[in-house]
Amino acid sequence: MEEFEHLRMLIDERTHRLDSNVQALRSLLDERYATQTKALDAAFAAAERAVTTALDSAEKAVNKAEVAAERRFESVNEFRAQLADQAGSFITRAEYDAKHEALGKQVDDLVRVMERGAGRARGVSAVTATLMTAGGLVVAIIVAVVTIIASR
């Protein structure tokens, strides 16, 4: 029986040692779990801050881009308004055609007047030449008659 007692003591001692080991492992696992939980919580918090910062930066960039686009569209609209104002001051095709036709008629009238004036000038020149020739002829005849009369 003593052997039985001795075996029981050995079993109790080993059971106690195993319980201690199990308890130590449990503590170690609990500690590691707590450490990993803290690390994951810290990592998630850092990731959340990074995402929040990135979203804030992206929102600011979008706002700046919207403001820049708005300014660009305002300047484009101003340019379009200037073009519209300028186009409003241009002469229309119908007005141009009417004025061009009127100017063409005036040019035609001036050409006719100039042709008539040139014709008259040619006529006056011809009449003047004829009169001068006739006058020269008359003078020559008078000189001839006077010369004949004087020589007698």
Image (cartoon, rainbow, N blue to C red):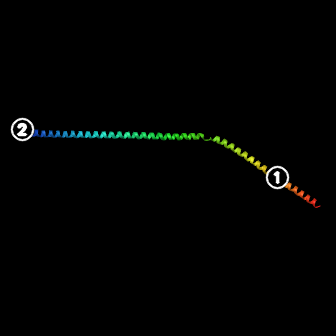
Q: Residue at x 8, y 39 (%)?
A: 9
Position of residue 43 measured from the top left corner of the image (x, y, whole percent): 29, 41
Residue in view at x 46 percent, y 41 percent: 69
Towards the viewer: 85 or 94: 85
Q: Residue furthest left?
A: 2
What secondary structure is marked by label 1? helix
Q: Is residue 6 left or right of residue 33?
A: left
The local secondary structure at tag 2 comes to helix
Q: Residue at x 64, y 40 (%)?
A: 95
Q: Nearer the viewer, residue 111 or 131?
A: 131
Amino acid marked by disc 2: Glu
Relative to the observer, which residue lies in front, 7 or 101? Answer: 101
| Quarter of the figure with residue 99 | top right
Q: Quadrant of residue 141?
A: bottom right
Outermost residue to the bottom: 151
Which quadrant is home to the N terminus?
A: top left
Q: Which residue is mark 2?
A: 5
Q: Which residue is mark 1?
A: 128
Specify the farthest residue to the front: 150
